[in-house]
Image (cartoon, rainbow, N blue to C red):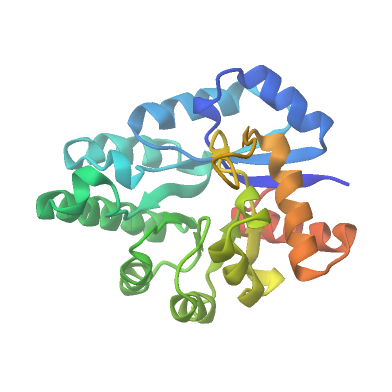
Amino acid sequence: MTTIDTHAHLDQLENLDQALREAVQAGVEAIVAVSMDLNSCRKNLEIKKKTQYPLIALAMGMHPAEANRAKVSRCLALIHEHAGELAAIGEIGLDFWYKWVRKDQAKKDEQREVFRAFLEAAKELDLPAVIHSRGVWRECLETAQRIGVCKAVFHWYSGPIDVLSDILKEGYYISTTPSLAYSPQSQEAIRHAPIEQTLIETDSPVFFQAQRDEEGFQAGPKDVVKTLKAYCVLKDLDEEKAVAILNQNARTFFRIDN
């Protein structure tokens, strides 16, 4: 049984070679490497060029935490230069929960401007968008709809069910992480989302911990298997049948070759 990790920050892993070896040993056949900013895009491009297996599908974009209108044009230029090598635009989106953004209208407006610029690129290049929407779920959806993005995944969705319903009606996807094993918000979202519009991921190298006094783990791409297992427990599905559908979702969404 093989799996696909649809969201990992490979450029942030301390020991990439080891992480990739462990992923292969765990049966991970492909990884979508998402980017945070211009430097991250460049690093992931090099990782893709150097990695034979597992297959690396590349996403380029600017994370809301790194939103910087002064750097957008250079990042977009790199995206257009390598458009034929890309599987998606991302990670992009909005997040007003950061302390330095919460009460700063200028920072919020900068995030909005940057988000729109990358959504326009996704539409122009006919690439799916990987959307970070924490705390701004409705606005992220409405912005993607207004621009006319055809394909999008709301990464690690944990927002309101009414917004989720509209995401699904639009034909967009959501993804989930190992947090599914313990997070009520993640669990509620996945209960309502059909498997045909779901992707599984790790968001490596995020640290997952159910409770502060419990032992956690720093995720690597190999841990997409934990996401799969949590998904199948919650949905009461056979692992092999579920992973066949989830893998096909990933291949179709990101145009990943077998």
Q: Position of residue 246 (x, y in %)?
A: 74, 59
Q: Is residue 119 left or right of residue 205?
A: left
Q: In this view, does 156 lie above or below 98?
A: below
Residue at the image position 87 percent from the left and 63 percent from the top: 241
Let me know if residue 7 appears in the view.
yes
Q: In which quarter of the image is residue 192?
A: bottom right
Q: As rendered, which of 191 and 153 lies closer to the eye?
A: 191
Q: As rendered, which of 21 and 182 lies closer to the eye?
A: 182
Q: Quadrant of residue 77?
A: top left
Q: As rendered, which of 241 and 178 lies closer to the eye?
A: 178
Q: As rendered, which of 231 and 181 lies closer to the eye?
A: 181
Q: In this view, does 64 lie above or below 158?
A: above
Q: Position of residue 51 (x, y in %)?
A: 66, 24
Q: Is residue 63 above or below residue 193?
A: above
Residue at the image position 42 percent from the left and 32 percent from the top: 41
Residue at the image position 35 percent from the left and 58 percent from the top: 119
Count of marks, rendered view: 0
Q: Position of residue 148 (x, y in %)?
A: 37, 71
Residue at the image position 74 percent from the left and 32 percent from the top: 23
Q: In which quarter of the image is residue 125?
A: bottom left
Q: Is residue 252 left or right of residue 116?
A: right
Q: In this view, does 171 lie to the left or right of 134?
A: right
Let me know if residue 258 appears in the view.
no
Q: Where is residue 11 in the image (x, y as percent from the top left)?
A: 50, 26
Q: Is residue 75 left or right of residue 231?
A: left
